[in-house]
Amino acid sequence: MKLSEWVLCENFVVSKMALKMIEKYDKYWENSHGFLGVAAVLDPRFNISLIEYYYSSIYGERGDEMIESIRRRCFDLHTIYEGKNKNDGASSKPLASTTEVNNFDGFEMFLNAKKKVKSVHVQLELDHHLEVDLLSRHESFDIFAWWKSSGLKYPTLQAIARDVLVVPVSTVASESLFSTGAREISPN
């Protein structure tokens, strides 16, 4: 938002530099905003509210569309991780003989119905996280400790948080990312 203000600056050098920086930032943002949005949603101090507030400011009329794209990414991740958990559990289950299966047809139908109810409940895990009141923001907050202790309440989201929140946002120094000068080797 500050860069957008600087583009309108009366000083031509500042305006030109801000325009080049916006071009570089937009390229970076295009590749990373979805991932960063998911990370923000996983932070119980911000959740989807942070995305709703800033995306409306950043994207204007397209804000709602962009907010929905982050929400979809979260649900897609949730579905993928839930699928991983189901596959892990299924592989450890012993296989029954054909005689046992025939004798337990009614029981199998009961279990299948129960799985469907459970998957609906698990879908509500993310919904619940998105609707819960935000935690207060303070510097000493340890998001990793919070997710560790919230594993019983949000087991699938905990697995997502464990993978998403440890990824570095960038491995490029900000000076390099926003440099507008050419990369030159000094003659000395």
Image (cartoon, grey):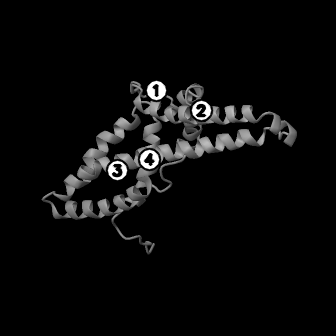
Q: Amino acid at mark 3?
A: Met
For disc 2, the marked residue is 118
Q: CA distance from mark 3 to mark 4?
A: 10 Å
The mark closer to the camera, 3 or 1, is 3
For disc 4, the marked residue is 72
Secondary structure beneath dot 3 equals: helix
The mark closer to the camera, 3 or 4, is 4
Q: Is residue 27 left or right of residue 2?
A: right
Q: Residues within 10 Å of mark 1 (few under 14, many from 20)?
A: few
For disc 3, the marked residue is 66
Mark 2 or mark 3: whose residue is earlier in sequence: 3
Q: CA distance from mark 1 to mark 4?
A: 31 Å
Q: As drawn, which residue projects farthest toward the bottom? A: 187
Secondary structure beneath dot 2 equals: helix
Residue 82 in picture, x, y percent from top left: 60, 41
The mark closer to the camera, 1 or 4, is 4
Q: CA distance from mark 3 to mark 1?
A: 31 Å
For disc 1, the marked residue is 140
Q: Which mark is residue 128?
A: none
Quadrant position of the C terminus in the picture:
bottom left
Q: Residues within 10 Å of mark 2 (few under 14, many from 20)?
A: few
The residue lying at 39 percent from left, 34 percent from top is: 46
Residue 125 in picture, x, y percent from top left: 51, 32
Q: CA distance from mark 4 to mark 2?
A: 21 Å
Secondary structure beneath dot 1 equals: loop
Mark 1 or mark 4: whose residue is earlier in sequence: 4
Q: Residues within 10 Å of mark 3 (few under 14, many from 20)?
A: many
